[in-house]
Each structure stands twice: as structure tokens, then as C-alpha cells.
Amino acid sequence: MNENKPGVIIDICVIPPLEETLEFFANPTGDFAQYSQLYGKEDMDALLRAIRADPATFLLNLMDEAGVDIAVLTAEDAETTMGMKVPNDKVADFVRSHPDRFIGMAAVDPHKGMKAIRELEYAVNDLGMKCVCLEPWLHKLRSNDKLYYPIYAKCVELDIPVWIHSSINYVPQLTMDFGRPIYLDEVAGHFPELRIIAGHGGWPWVNEMVALLWRHPNVYTDISAIRPKYIGTPGTGWEPLLRYGNNIIQNKILFGTAWPAQQFKSSIEEIKALPLKEEVKRKWLGENARGLLRL
């Protein structure tokens, strides 16, 4: 790792290089075909060929090159609506290969009712996972749908954060509104003890996201799956996050890549190039996440 880097660097959203996820990125089909255009399929093909030989070592080498200390690896469960699942057990096994560098983020399907609650308890209490991922756009729900409420309550009981997709999606058949941040206003008010990570920064509803972060002490956001340079580019719609993220909400923004969608090294370099105070850059890159995850 780079010993000259400023402070701890934690990536709050990394797709683990398991066969289920590698296959998706190698061959996104049907409704998800557009993702190959968004994230560069030719580059992705070469990357995936290199990963498969030794996934954990490959990921750690990339992290070390960029100076990333800890990666939070996400499971996936949208089995009922989309037939998609990256099992918690597999992610937990991967985390156990290097528990000093990886943290597991569980996933559950709200359509499974009490089975989802029991799965979450198992993931946290038996597998050692530290947070949970929910994807309303894939569940075909909004984040304030009452199917989620038992999960939110269980997260409070287990004292873990919940990561919730809160931004655009690129599947035309799935309405963008599923990811609108405003629905978290109700959730944050109903569950003031729930630590909420509103994933992906909220674009194109960045003003809503900033308002949530300012209004609710328990709401955070990450900038995963986003090129950070665009946050500093006028006319992109990210201006409110940059402006307020340098002062009033500086403690609420978390670094993430959604790797392999974005790369560690270039993302960190682009954050360091943003017109932010140096202490704010350190907060974005890892100090905020360390506090949120209670590391």
C-alpha cells in the first residue's frame, strides 16, 4: 500500500469477483445489455480474463496499487423479481480469505418476507457480515415500501447500516422513480436509529440527495459507479453535492467505485483533484466510512 496516502481509504461498494458477478459483467444481456456500453465491454473482457486466475489476489493487487485499505464486498438478492442472486455465503467465504482487507455486505429479498429476515440474521450473526444491500429498482419497489420496513427494523436491532440504491438505473423497463432519493425522507424519519447509505449519489435528483443529507443525521451517500471528475464538472448536475459536500455535509459522503464499474486508482486520483479542502478529501475517502462502519 502507498504509505504516503492521506489517511485510511475505504471503498464502500465493491462487486466481488465471484463467478456470478463476473458472468454478468462479461455478458450483460436482455434488459441489462446497455450496461456493457456504459462501462466499456472491451476493457471489461480483458479485465475479466485476468481476474479469473486468482480473484482475491487480483483484487488486492488493484487495491494496493491505488492505496485502498478496505473494500466492502456486496452480495445481491433480487431473486423474486429478476432471478438475480449473489449468495451471502459466497461473499462471506471471499471475505474470510482476507478479513483484514474485506468486509461483507449481505443482501436480502424483501419479497421473501420472514425468510429474508432470517437470512439477514444468519448473514450478520453467523457469517459476520457488517451491513446489508437493498436495490429497490431490482425489487420493483420504492425505498419507503412497507415490504422493506421489517428489514429496516431488523437492521436497527442488529445495529448495522443499510445500503440502498438511490439513483438512476439504465434499464428502460424499470422506472427510474424506483431509485428516487426523496422516498428515503420517510424512511429516515420513521427509523431515526437506522444508518442509511443512499447509494450512487442520487443523480439526477442531486438536490434531493443533498437535502436528505442535510436534514437527516442518519443518512449518508456514496459516489460509487460515478466518475468523480464529473462531480467537479459544471453542467453535470453534481454541483450541489460538490458545493455542500465541502462544508455542511462533508461528514456524509463516502467513497465507492462499484468496481469493476469504476476503477480504484483513477477514482481516487479524481477525488484528490476535486476543489475540496484537504481534510474533506480525507473524510470522503475513508474517515466518514470508518465512523459509519464503526471500525
Image (cartoon, helix red, strand yellow):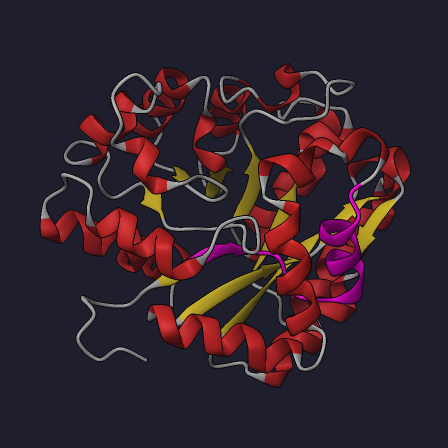
Q: Quadrant of the N terminus?
A: bottom left
Residue 140 in the figure: left or right of residue 176:
right
List x then y, in percent, for residue 118.
80, 55
For the image shown, how many numbered marks are present on the structure? 0
Q: Is the residue 132 above or below the residue 94 in the image?
A: above
Q: Quadrant of the C terminus?
A: bottom left
List x then y, in percent, for residue 87.
79, 61
Residue 149 in the figure: left or right of residue 215:
right
What residue do we see at 62% from left, 15% from top? 177
**Foreground: 11 or 291?**
11
Tell me if residue 24 is in the magenta stretch: yes
Which of the 4 image quadrants contains residue 142?
A: top right
Q: Is the residue 136 above or below the residue 256 in the image?
A: above
Tell me if residue 126 is in the magenta stretch: no
What residue do we see at 32% from left, 64% from top? 9
Which of the 4 image quadrants contains residue 172?
A: top right
**Foreground: 84 or 247?**
84
Q: Is the residue 30 above or below the residue 266 in the image?
A: above
**Foreground: 92 or 228?**
228
List x then y, in percent, for residue 30.
85, 32
Residue 146 in the figure: left or right of residue 167:
right
What residue do we see at 70% from left, 31% from top? 34
List x then y, in percent, for residue 232.
25, 32
What residue do we see at 68% from left, 64% from top? 48
Which segment is the magenta one? Answer: 11-28
